[in-house]
Image (cartoon, helix red, strand yellow):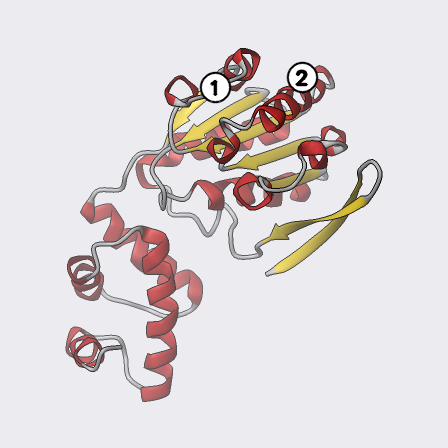
Amino acid sequence: MSVRLVTLLLMPEQFPLHFEFRANQTFDDFFAGENEPIVKDLKQCVLGNGAQQIFLWGKSGQGKSHLLQACCHYAQQHERQSFYFDLSRYRRHRPAILMGLDDYDVVCLDNVDWIVGQEKWEQALCEFMQRHYDRGHQLIISATCLPNYMTIKTPDLKTRLSWGLMLQLKTLVNTHSIDALIFKADAMGFEISPQVGRFLMIQHQSELDGLWHLLDKLDRASLAAKRKLTVPFLKRLFNAEF
């Protein structure tokens, strides 16, 4: 992971804002499954050929953060300035940190529902969205639900969040989840069989991002033991409270 550091001017102080640019969270590293049309819409938005604003929503662990990071990668590949901002990490800071983000061609605001109910944040976000929109720049927002189901205190913000294209990430069914595990393992440089993928899904009914962390641990265990990831090997690992 590489981190891009940007200093945004605040009054009367400067606040260092970190843009966490995760190298392994690109569109190529994302298993889309039935969400392939959403990936296409996001790419078109980033290039300025589609919707100017996209509101991406879905349950936690479905890959929203990954997709927003992927949008930033894709923008930079096409020589467009981009910035990823996780609102869940900065909601305790002053909302003035949004100042200056409207300079970027593409801004991705993750976890917007985390600042809902905080009037100063809501107003600052509303003003940023208007500035960014007026400059013709692209905005991609993520949340766990639609704006109509949020307890937003600022009416203008609810209206602005509903601009543009509203996209819901579909939950991968079990078969596609196994395919996603195989896809992710291949991207990490090792191989798992459909049988191993099925075993992991049955034993660990968790969100996919939790399974990605498990894959990393399994890869290290496999290398240390000089064993392939088979179901018997996994059973021994889990019985040993792996």
Query: Where is residue 226, by image quadrant?
Result: bottom left
Left or right: 78 as drawn, with respect to 63: right
Query: Where is residue 92, by image quadrant?
Result: top right
Looking at the picture, does residue 44 appear above or below residue 12?
A: above
Amino acid on which the number 1 mark rests in the picture: Leu
- Nearer to me, 119 or 17: 119
Residue furthest to the bottom: 225
Which disc is residue 66 wearing? none
Which callout, 2 or 1, points to the residue nearer the camera?
Answer: 2
Q: What residue did someone put label 2 on?
A: 130
Left or right: 134 as drawn, with respect to 214: right
Q: Position of residue 50 (x, y in %)?
A: 56, 21
Query: Residues under labels 2 and 1: Cα distance?
Result: 16 Å
Q: What residue did someone put label 1 on?
A: 165
Left or right: 16 as drawn, with respect to 12: left
Does any portion of residue 78 appear in the rendered image?
Answer: no
Q: Are marks 2 and 1 in contact (CB under 8 Å)?
A: no
Query: Where is residue 132, by image quadrant?
Result: top right
Q: Residue at x 52, y 42 (%)?
A: 88
Q: Position of residue 195 (x, y in %)?
A: 16, 64
- For the N terminus, the image quarter is bottom right
- Nearer to me, 9 or 12: 12
Q: Residue at x 74, y 19 (%)?
A: 135
Q: Position of residue 117 (x, y in %)?
A: 49, 26
